[in-house]
Structure formats: structure tokens, C-alpha cells
Amino acid sequence: MIVIILAGGKGSRIGMEKALIELEGSRKLIDLVVDSVRGSRAEDFSVAITENTPKSLEYCKRANYKTIDTLGRGYHEDLRYLLSSHPEFVSVACDIPFLRSEHIDALIAAYSRYRTSITGAVPLAIVPRGITIGHTFEHEGKALVACGINVATNSKESLPIIFNDPMLAINVNTASDLRIARRV
């Protein structure tokens, strides 16, 4: 299973290319995510970029990260585009600073067992106060927040894998999210 790190968004809510945001000293969000991917059971990884992220492309080239060009028309559109050449892969948003290798391995294991799309989620009740909440959904009576890690396939159904890790719910989408991530 390969990982594709999604780093092609406009970053309009935060006003910059999110992959290049520095969190730990001079460590960029993309580097933190790549470290977790490299420590996982993933076979390989690439960074998906778009015309919206020319500085991220330049940085990835300098860091020797493989890149894939996508259309930059939106999250779901880019996933569909990627699925046209990769029948299944782990998708990881570049803005999850507290992602760990174990999260990726759990997704790969769930896919190996169920052979369908898998959505990584965190219970809404444990999301740290002040974090921008993205996509929420309900499963078996629990309110969940999608956390930006998934196994993407062409399957019409998706099963959630629930991580009881509040740190995984921190996606850096706004200046407030960035302040919280830096404080943590």
C-alpha cells in the first residue's frame, strides 16, 4: 500500500501553503507527515501537489520527495483523479502534525481485513477545544470527526476506523489551529 500526501490545497483559510508551515523550530508540516509515513508499513509515498502550491513543489524537489501533479479543483476531485491511476492508497492530509506511523499502519491493516475504503475518525467528544471542526458524521450512535487520513478506493462504501487520540484531530486549517498546534 502506498501513501499519497495531499499538499495541493489553496490554504485559503490560513493564507499560505500549509505544507510549508513551520511548527517545530524549522520543521515543516510536510516533513512531520513524511517522517510518520516513513516509519509506517507503507511501501512508498508521493506528495500530491497542484498549481496552487508552487513553493511546496519546489520544497519537495529539494527534499527528494516524489510528487504527483493533481488538478487542484478540490479535495474530492483530486482524490478521484488520483484513483484513476492508483486503485487504492492511503491518503494523508499534509496538515496533520500529530500523525503517527501507528495511525497509518492501522489504516493499512483495516484495508487488508475489509478491502474497502476506510475513513480515519476521532470522536467529536475528545477534539481539543478551539480546533476547527471539519467533516463530522455519525457511526453507531457516536459523533465522529474525519481526521484527514483515509484509505481511498473506488468502493461506494467506507468504513470508519476510530482513533481515540485527540491529537490526531488537530488539522492546521486556520491561524487558531496553528496557535494550538504550536502550544501543544
Image: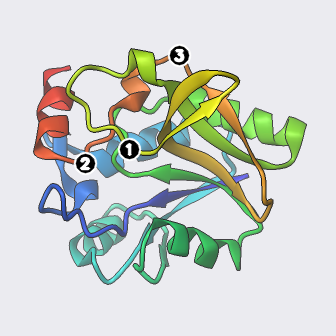
* Relative image position of residue 49 (x, y in whole percent): 40, 73
Q: Which residue is mark 3?
A: 164
Q: CA distance from mark 3 to mark 2?
A: 21 Å
Q: Which mark is residue 172?
A: none
- SS class, disc 3: loop
**In terms of sequence position, does the residue under pointer 2 or pointer 1 come before the other?**
1
Give the answer, above or below, for where 71 lies relative to 3.
below
Q: CA distance from mark 1 to mark 3?
A: 17 Å
Q: Which residue is mark 2?
A: 173
* Relative image position of residue 10 (x, y in whole percent): 26, 70
Q: Residue at x 88, y 35 (%)?
A: 113
Q: Tags 2 and 1 in contact by the CB under 8 Å rule?
A: yes
Frontmost residue, 93 versus 41:
93
Q: How many marks?
A: 3
Frontmost residue, 172 versus 125:
125
- Mark 1 or 3, which is nearer the eye? 1
- SS class, disc 2: loop
Is residue 46 at least partly visible in the picture?
yes
* Relative image position of residue 148 (x, y in whole percent): 48, 45
- Neighbour class for label 2 at 10 Å: few (<14), some, many (≥20)? many
- Mark 2 or 1, which is nearer the eye? 1
**In terms of sequence position, does the residue under pointer 1 or pointer 3 come before the other?**
1
Q: CA distance from mark 2 to mark 1?
A: 9 Å
Q: Which residue is mark 1?
A: 134
Asked whether, in this view, residue 113 is left or right of residue 22, the answer is: right
Is residue 24 at least partly visible in the picture?
no
Amino acid bearing label 1: Gly
Q: Residue at x 12, y 62 (%)?
A: 15
Residue occupying the far front of the picture: 141
Q: Residue at x 20, y 20 (%)?
A: 184
Give the answer, above or below, for where 71 lies relative to 135.
below
Asked whether, in this view, residue 59 is left or right of residue 81, the answer is: left
